[in-house]
Image (cartoon, rainbow, N blue to C red):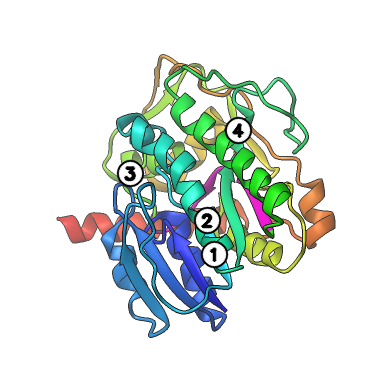
Amino acid sequence: MRILLTGSAGFVGSHLGERLLEDGHEVVGADNYISGQRRNTAFLEDYPAFEALEADVSHAIAYQGPALDWVMHFASPASPPHYQKHPIETLMVGAQGTQNALVLAREHRAKFMLASTSEVYGDPLEHPQVETYWGNVNPIGIRGCYDEAKRYAEAITMAYHRTHGLDTRIIRIFNTYGPRMRADDGRVVTNFINQALAGEPLTVYGDGSQTRSFQYVSDLVEGIVRLMGVVHHEPVNLGNPDEYTIQAFAEIIRNRIAPAAEIRHLPMPQDDPKQRRPDITKARALLGWEPVTPLEQGLEATIAYFSKLLETAL
């Protein structure tokens, strides 16, 4: 198949692009590098079937090539420091960027996939989070630019499906980690690993009792590929139901890298979710999918990646 993938230089986008290329597909990767990394595009360009398209998909997707089979919209800053630094761009890529990608898919009679997020659930009042839960989002808070952009993106995707019969998919991605994340990503996995590698205190916000679940990137990609092969238009959670407190996770990272490191507690950021764990009943039934990578194995690969980056920088 020929697939246009927005956000191809991002963390998830680069892994997905690699998998699609390994599976024998042609991939056109579009990115404007606000949060994507050029090293990821350089990596994908090693594949003859990859074509890079530098573009801000919020304004236009200037694709003039052969007919597409899929448009997969993965473009967006995804970590709080990045989308809070670029709130307007984040809203635009979720709104106009999604519409531009939908229009392109319709023009090519292609299938469409939207990368949404567990952040549509906000600071959830239901736990674990199932796809039918509508969420608890502060639309004008500092996280609202990302949360509401993705909620709108889901709404317009369903509108194109219902109005134009577009063959659509929506995935809600829960916390995902692995190699090729940005060192300044700002989320707990990269923060803790890089702080421990640098011999710095590990920063925990609040008392550390808030929870997260951590999914290794190859498990996410497997779920995405499986969803491409079924017909299902409503959102599907893709995440790991294993749940850790942030305090316990900090101790796991510290003990693997720097057992003597201090854990420092700082005030909680605004609207930081207190609990986050996916209900993956639908993914299990629909896709026969669940995460298979143990946390220890995923952390080993991720720590090795950031250790190498640190050595290269020295």
The span picked out in magenta is 168-180
Give the residue at mark 1: 107
- Is residue 304 something one can see in this rendering? yes
Decide which of 80, 27 is in the foreground and name it.
Answer: 27
Residue 218 percent across, percent down from the top left: 56, 62
Decide which of 159, 111 is in the foreground and name it.
Answer: 159
**Residue 274 occupies which quadrant of the picture?**
top right
The quadrant of the rendering that contains the C terminus is: bottom left
The quadrant of the rendering that contains the N terminus is: bottom right
Q: As drawn, is 75 to the left or to the right of 209?
A: left
Q: Are marks 1 and 2 in contact (CB under 8 Å)?
A: yes
Q: Earlier in the sequence, mark 3 or mark 1?
A: 1
Q: CA distance from mark 2 to mark 4?
A: 23 Å
**Residue 169 occupies which quadrant of the picture?**
bottom right
Residue 72 percent across, percent down from the top left: 53, 60
For residue 7, which numbered disc appears in the image?
A: none
For residue 103, which numbered disc appears in the image?
A: 2
Give the residue at mark 3: 194
**Callout 2: few (<14), some (14-19), or many (20+) C-alpha neighbours within 10 Å?**
some
Q: CA distance from mark 1 to mark 2?
A: 6 Å
Q: Earlier in the sequence, mark 3 or mark 4?
A: 4
**Residue 90 occupies which quadrant of the picture?**
top left
For residue 120, which numbered disc appears in the image?
A: 4
| Nearer the camera: disc 1 or disc 4 | 1
- Mark 4 secondary-structure assignment: helix
Instruction: Give the amino acid type for the residue marked by disc 3 in the picture.
Output: Asn
**Callout 1: few (<14), some (14-19), or many (20+) C-alpha neighbours within 10 Å?**
few
Image point 54% across, 84% down: which residue? 24
Residue 310 percent across, percent down from the top left: 24, 54
Instruction: Give the amino acid type for the residue marked by disc 4 in the picture.
Output: Val
